[in-house]
């Protein structure tokens, strides 16, 4: 299989405080990797480093055959990396439709065929609720609806790689299932490669091909989910 994202000895820091050490990561095109670990071990920082909103202080990041270590977030977005941060972050004063349209900006400079077509139909197909509420302001939506919108907005940019930070955290159980089902379809039907930070090991195992456990800013275990059970790593993740 071909590698889409490769991290080579990546380090990151907040000011003087280093939080990631020598992270090596290989994500196959079309694959899904689950990043797991206890609170505060650096999972969010690692996603931010892939997106470029967090600087890589040492090491290299390669995406889709190019070295993007020095690339700005908007450049990585145009190269095909989409990010759904923790806590959703939709634009509250814009409607659902306007939020989705804002996601189209990632298509700038990526070929004429992609731009000017409006919101791709498959987004409303994945999240039918968004079509129903497309004229509503995002700020009045439920947490589950906002999460669907945040994922939809990232998909509007037609990413090759989608980064998801705990997409079902704090969401009502009946909506969690809908989001998980939609994410499976993002993989199988859209062929989007995924890196997901996920606390629920059962979902991580049923969803991802590969897993990576972080502990105090280092990878302490990596492997294929098919070759081990979630129970084998539970002690590294649960407090
Ligand atoms: N903006 C920041 N400034 C300084 N330190 C930070 C900042 N954000 C995170 N940290 C620290 O960096 C470390 C890694 O945090 P990070 O949020 O990446 O972990 P995480 O594994 O995603 O945790 P959680 O599961 O709680 O989201 C923690 O020690 C955290 O306190």
Image (cartoon, rainbow, N blue to C red):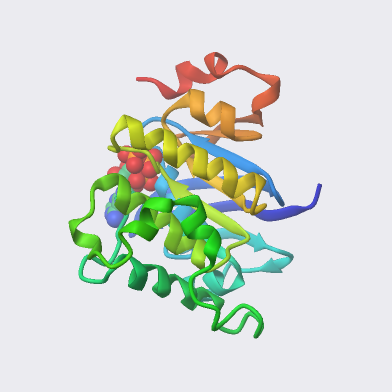
Up-down relation of residue 143 to residue 207 (above or below)? below
* Closer to us: 101 or 79: 101
Up-down relation of residue 32 to residue 134 (above or below)? above
Q: Spot the residue most to the right.
A: 1
* Closer to us: 135 or 2: 135
At 60% across and 40% down in the image, what residue appears? 33
At 50% across and 23% down in the image, what residue appears? 202
Residue 216 visible in the shown view: no
* Closer to us: 160 or 59: 160
Number of marks in picture = 0
Q: Spot the residue most to the left.
A: 140
At 31% across and 50% down in the image, what residue appears? 145
Instruction: Locate the C terminus by quadrant.
Output: top left
Specify whether 129 is left or right of 91. right
At 54% across and 55% down in the image, what residue appears? 162
How far from the left and from the top, in percent, is residue 31?
68, 44
How far from the left and from the top, in percent, is residue 208?
60, 35
Residue 48 visible in the shown view: yes
Q: Quadrant of residue 66?
A: bottom right
How far from the left and from the top, in percent, is residue 106?
51, 74
């Amino acid at each position: 299989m071909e590698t889409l994202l490769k991290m080579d000895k990546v380090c990151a820091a907040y000011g003087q405080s280093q939080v990631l050490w020598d992270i090596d990561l290989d994500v196959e095109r079309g694959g899904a990797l689950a990043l797991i670990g206890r609170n505060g071990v650096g999972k969010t920082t690692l996603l931010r480093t892939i997106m470029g909103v967090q600087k890589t202080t040492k090491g290299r990041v390669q995406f889709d055959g190019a070295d993007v270590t020095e690339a700005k977030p908007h450049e990585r977005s145009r190269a095909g990396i989409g990010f759904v941060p923790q806590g959703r972050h939709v634009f509250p004063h814009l409607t659902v439709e306007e939020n989705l349209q804002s996601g189209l900006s990632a298509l700038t400079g990526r070929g004429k065929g992609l731009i000017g077509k409006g919101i791709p139909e498959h987004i409303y197909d994945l999240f039918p609720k968004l079509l129903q509420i497309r004229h509503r302001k995002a700020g009045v939506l439920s947490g589950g609806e906002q999460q669907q919108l945040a994922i939809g907005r990232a998909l509007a940019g037609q990413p090759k790689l989608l980064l998801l930070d705990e997409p079902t955290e704090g969401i009502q159980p009946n909506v969690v299932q809908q989001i998980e089902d939609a994410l499976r379809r993002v993989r199988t039907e859209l062929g989007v490669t995924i890196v997901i930070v996920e606390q629920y090991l059962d979902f991580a195992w049923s969803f991802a091909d590969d897993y990576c456990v972080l502990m105090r800013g280092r990878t302490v275990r990596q492997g294929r989910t098919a070759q081990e059970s979630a129970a084998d790593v539970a002690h590294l993740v649960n407090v």
